[in-house]
Amino acid sequence: MPAAPAPAAAGGTTGPASPGERGGVVRASTSLRILAALAIIFTAWAAQDLILPILLALFFSLVGNPIIRVLGKLWIPRALAAVLLVAAGIAGVVALGRELVEPASAWVEQVPRELRQLGPQLKRMTKPMADANKAAENIARAADGSARNVQVVRTELNDPYGALTTTPKLLASVLAVVLLTLFFMIFGERLQHAAIANLPNRQQKRLTVDILQSIEQEISRYVLTISLINVAVGLVLAAALHWFCDLSMPEALLWGTVAAVLNFAPYVGPLIGVLLMLLMGFVEFDYPLPSMLPAAIYLGLHTIEGQILTPLVLGKRMAISPLVLMLALMVFGWAWGIIGLLLAVPLIVCVKIVLTKIDGLEGWAKVLE
């Protein structure tokens, strides 16, 4: 009789792992990564009231740190430089808001009245389509042989205390962003050095310092450059609306500011801007060609900025794949709304920088491009 095979030693292995077992480990690891990503997305959505002020404050502090260093070379203490920088930012926002509040209020009062006058015109334009839909509905009912009466019940929820509860919450969020930005500017560098000192070896410390410095330099460069470009686009649009569309300067400045803010969100922002320019044109003018002129001016400026100016200034260092960018805009816009759209590009740039600096992950940085 052939000898029976000797049993494996306790705790040992009978040979190399089979391909199925190795595949099981890979599949398990991939599943865990997918579940972790979904958990992170859900947490970001559920805790947005806590996360967004911190992210905005970090974002503003990253932009302000290079300015604070320049002020430090002028023998201005870091705390005083941070206070001056935050105060200058608040003063600029307040001054711009004072200039825009009057035309914005007039526009809000004017739009419903103009849209009511525009309604009959749109109804006449869409009448053939409505008649065709009604005819198709009648044919479908005749073929079905039975008509069902559908009653639509509309419910309206009036919350007289909604504004009383929303306004303090908004003011608290704004105050939190301002204070966190100030504290990150003053104490962030010290906290960063203390955290890096706790890393176990010199290589990890050097890698972490390199990543943080790259993020600060690239994000600061990107945001300052894009901000200057968007401000220029807003000013040129305001001047064009004033000269070519005969809008008053405060109203033209309002639409220039809206265009500059929307331009921070690629693809989505310009699309919303074109629709707003069309709406403004139809409200302001009575004839089709003048009504489309504001949208045409905005579209021309955005084409020059997006296809020539921004690539020429930034080059390919901030190149992100349009598909990846659209996915990021969808995810962050769904999770955090308009603020997510504004933060999507800087966050993707941070991810790309981290992937570029870590050995073995450079290929994923190329995927983002």
Image (spheres, rainbow, N blue to C red):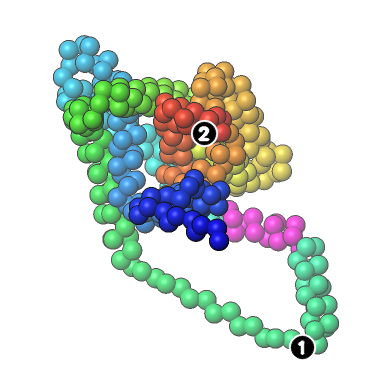
Image coordinates of residue 178 in percent, x first then y, are 25, 38
Quarter of the image for residue 157 reads: bottom left
Q: Secondary structure at mark 2?
A: helix
Mark seen at residue 364: 2
Task: Return the residue at label 1.
Answer: 146
Residue 312 appearing in the image: yes
Residue 34 as seen in the image, left or right of residue 164: right
| Label whose residue precedes the other's in the sequence (2 or 1) | 1
Is 90 situated above or below 284?
Answer: above
Whether residue 333 is visible to the viewer of this picture, yes or no, is no
Q: CA distance from mark 2 to mark 1?
A: 59 Å
Identity of the residue furthest to the front in this view: 1
Residue 190 occupies quadrant: top left
Q: Residue extending furthest bottom?
A: 146
Which quarter shows the N terminus? Answer: bottom right
202 relative to 262, above or below: above
* Residue at x 83% of width, y 77% of height: 139
State yes or no: residue 363 in magenta.
Answer: no
Query: 263 or 364: which is nearer to us?
Result: 364
76 up-or-down from 61: above or below = above
